[in-house]
Amino acid sequence: MAVSTSDKAPYHHGDLRRSLLDAASGILHRDGIGAVSLREVARAAGVSHNAPYRHFPSRDALLAGVAAEGFGRLRARLEAAGDDLAAMGEAYLAFAVAERPCFLLMFGSSLCKADFPDLAGAALEALRALDRVASGRAVSGGDASESRTIGPATLRAWAIVHGFAHLVADGQLSLEAASGALAADGTVP
Amino acid sequence: MAVSTSDKAPYHHGDLRRSLLDAASGILHRDGIGAVSLREVARAAGVSHNAPYRHFPSRDALLAGVAAEGFGRLRARLEAAGDDLAAMGEAYLAFAVAERPCFLLMFGSSLCKADFPDLAGAALEALRALDRVASGRAVSGGDASESRTIGPATLRAWAIVHGFAHLVADGQLSLEAASGALAADGTVP
DNA sequence: TGTCGGATGTTGACACTGCCAACTTCTGCC
DNA sequence: GGCAGAAGTTGGCAGTGTCAACATCCGACA
């Protein structure tokens, strides 16, 4: 007889990795980074407390996966802002506010980027979106060897926007104040 | 007979609160924020695992105490830089590098400043040292009611310096690159 | 000067966590 | 059709934060 009818959950999940990332992201946004435990994530995904280890070697690795996806969304927001540097700054700020817990995870002290190359790569990709506009020249092709060279204008713009974003995310500054100061500054030399 | 001779540790520590803060700070700088556990701190201070609860109601409260002292040291560095805004920026950066784990604790996601008024106060005091110079006018007296009004020039300077400091502390930027970009920018409008 | 309340520190316990090891169940490939 | 290995489970261990109950000591007050 058919054993995989709907009355019984299948032994294999299907795409547990995806579910774990989603569950972790949900807990992260709802209760903050401290509440994201492997066991809680496993519970949310409906699997045993050790199942996550088949997809992530450690809790930090799971968090790194969540953070990497966050960088992907940040990059998408930056690219959606087009070629307007001021709009990119606003987008950066908006991301920090809308995804505060994830932003803090991405740029916080919890994760050592050096331990997770994929995470570092995702972060660099997001930065290059900023660099493309700030340095005023398109990044030619995909020459990986030179991908580390970020223009000084980008650094300045990044620092300003990142500083405001962090101060807002940290609750030391209101979004209005940051947004206003950012607009007044223009972020262009 | 004398019972409090040196061959036996006294039941009361003397200044356990101070010792706990020092022990926590030491562990923080040596092994990072994740290694700072109440039990490890208690061990380092030579007391039982529950003694810290007589001085701090929770682990976060202990960390908040450590962070507040960090803001005190940051403020001292900023004030030592005199009235030169560029020097203050350098001092801010230098603090982030020299006390990286503490900096990440102070501005990271671990602590909710709203839960610890003393911490928020210490942070504001450090900022006022920056404001005194950046806004170009001395903060008159100690009118606490107006202490929240920080000039826009201060916000901009703070954001730039803070952004660079965070990117360096996070390992996304070298100190040389940040320092160079900061000097080139001048941090003054 | 003696004593007693409260501050300080200790022991014991509980639920929770990350992670390891051994086992079971299923799937894709030859 | 069967089998190697991927995917998921159960059980266990050491470590953690926090609560409760108990022990010890200091200082104030009679």
Image (cartoon, coloured by chain):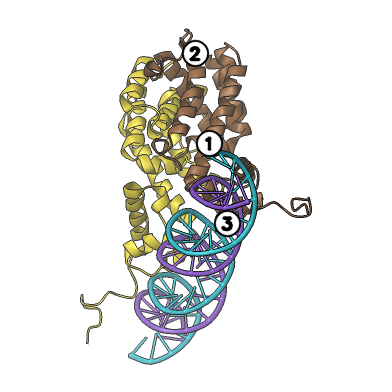
Chain colours: A brown, B yellow, C cyan, D purple
Residue B88 to residue B109: above or below: above
Q: Specify whether residue B124 is in view.
A: yes
Give the number of the disc on residue A132.
Answer: 2
Instruction: Name the subunit of mark 2.
Output: A
Instruction: Residue B143 in the image: state x and y as whole percent.
Output: 51, 37
Residue at 38% x, 70% y is B48
Residue farthest toward the top in the current orientation of the protein: A137
Instruction: Name the subunit of mark 3.
Output: A
Give neighbour class at mark 3: few <14, some 14-19, many 20+ (Cα, 10 Å).
Answer: some
Residue B15 to residue B189: above or below: below
Image marks 2 and 3: residues in contact by CB distance under 8 Å? no
Give neighbour class at mark 2: few <14, some 14-19, many 20+ (Cα, 10 Å).
Answer: some
Residue under circle 1?
A67
Residue at 52% x, 42% y is A63
**Quadrant in the picture for the N terminus of chain A:** bottom right
Q: Which of disc 1 and disc 3 is earlier in sequence?
A: 3
Q: Is residue D15 left or right of residue C13?
A: left
Amino acid identity at mark 2 = Arg
Image marks 3 and 1: residues in contact by CB distance under 8 Å? no
Give the number of the disc on residue A49.
Answer: 3
